[in-house]
Amino acid sequence: MDLKIYPTLEYSGYDLLDDGVIRATCPPDLLHYAGKYFSCSQWLYASLLPSPHDDTEWSAWYLTRLVSRQGWTVIACVNETTKLLDGSKCPAFALLVRCKRKNKKEFHSVDLSSDPLLDYLDDGIFHTDIEREAVLAIRGTSSTMDWSINLDEKAKPFTFYTKRRENHNPYAVYSDDLTALGLQGITGHVHSGMYGGAVAILESFAMRKYLSLLSINGYSVKIVGHSLGAGTAALIAAELRNGYLLSSNEILRSAKIRALTIATPACTSASISDAFAYDRLVLNVIKWSDAVPRFTRSNISKLAAEIVEYKAISEQWRSEDTDALKAYAASYGKAGDMTDKDNVINTETQSKSTEMSTFSSNVEIDSNQISSLITVAANLLDSSASSSGDLSNTTIVGTVTDSSSTSSTNNSASSWYSKAFQTSNLVSVVSAASTAIAITSNTRTNSSTSSDVVITNASITKNNSSSNAIQATVSSKRSFDKIKEAPPSDYLMKEDDIPLVVPGHIIQLYNENGVVKAAVIDHRHASLNRLYVLIDRFLDDHLMKGYLS
């Protein structure tokens, strides 16, 4: 439905003036930096072995074999979701380290002052030609217990500590202890299940102690993950950063931590997400067509409203597409324009259709112009079907009521005007014309209230012995743009529900005319506030293979 109405939807909304756009084009160095850790995010998927070797010991052995050629050493590996004695659930994870000499390109690094976003590349140890790196990888959803973590979505209060700023933040909290350390706290909420998993990894498996020792010894720490692992990785980075900043060890207080995540679900409130972005803590890579980062109660509610709103027109489009496909198949592909050969109109009618379509897309259409649309369609129909004689005495009478006083047309509607004149089926004429009126009214951007357009009497009468009347009515209760901004449905959103968003900065990958492009956005971007149901890409694009390709 989205792509039928707005064919350019995927690659629209990436101008710097658009809400939530940080960079219209992602800096190449930042994109390269994020891409370095794609393989790390799939380590635990790749090391899963079939039965009878499907336990942690075999997985750790196989992971060692997989990564040894890149110089990595496996410190710990628990490649199964674990339920602890206190009832908390811990996702699968692995800790790896390596120490290697930088090549010339890495040693002579990019100019980080050229763009504030390149602060993500600063790991605090650029002054040395030896790279010491530790990666904590968290696995995504692979078991039933992983799903139980995902579904434990209740928002849990959380405070993220960051360096004190001069600008006022309504979510900031202060105390004497924090002031003495030059810190402030940002209050918000996080995903309860993922936060529980993050704390379990750090405390129950002593990863906090390991990572602290590695940071003290000059290792840069990266937390990586995909899907469930991405959300957990972001919260591990936040919890670890809190501990570092409150530490009395100066090395830990100045240590750099980064979470580099793929297909991150919504797991923090907006205030925490903004704090992560400000501190360059979490960098996400998300595809425009990936459903999981957009799978929130609010977006599901909007989708439900859209399905109800557009049920009638979607059924009409499905019927038209089915008929066109049957006609195309029946002609063995000779009907190249996917229309029945009996419905192809002559050149003169096509010219009139083009003129009317151009007219409708460039001028404002008021109530009188809309009410004459069906009559114009009938006249065009008479001229195209006069040779057969069976429709020569057809008349169309229509009345239109319009609740909006000012309007402007939209290109999506003009195609429907053209469609109304390219058919010799009277029922299709009225239906297509009625749909054009509905879409025109729905896409008015200057109206202060939602449009209510109803074709009250659009009747077709054939002047012959067996006069029949066919009634066609199309009703549009509110505009498409209004639906996108509509509040969530009561049955999905509870009063105490706190909306969660994707944390930190986001490198969004999208396709424009066959070319994959990348922009840097945050949780405010319009594409993250709707759930797109794309049959061929809806879930496949969430898998690691979709990102690696």
Image: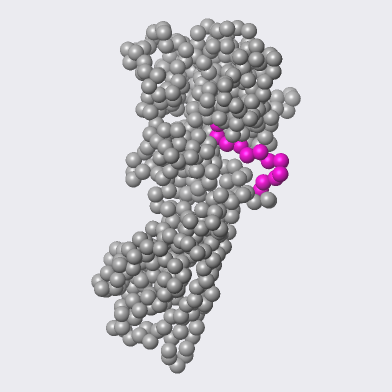
Q: Looking at the picture, how far across and down is residue 502, in whole percent?
A: 55, 34
Who is closer to the viewer here, 155 or 54?
Answer: 155
Instruction: Pick out the residue farthest to the bottom.
Output: 465
Along the line of sight, which residue is nearer the eye, 494 or 52? Answer: 494
Tell me if residue 83 is in the magenta stretch.
no
Stretch in magenta: 492-503
273 vs 109: above or below: below
Residue at the image position 32 percent from the left and 63 percent from the top: 358
Residue 459 picture location, percent across and down: 48, 79
Furthest residue to the left? 347
Residue at horizontal 61 percent and vertical 14 percent from the top: 182
Asked if residue 283 lies left or right of residue 363, the reply is right
Image quadrant assignment for residue 37: top left
Please give the name of the residue rendered at 37% of the width and 37% of the height, measured from the top-left corner.
Answer: 517
Q: Is residue 495 magenta?
A: yes
Q: For residue 239, say whether it is visible.
A: no
Quarter placement of the C terminus = top left
Instruction: Name the residue at 33% across, 15% down.
Output: 105
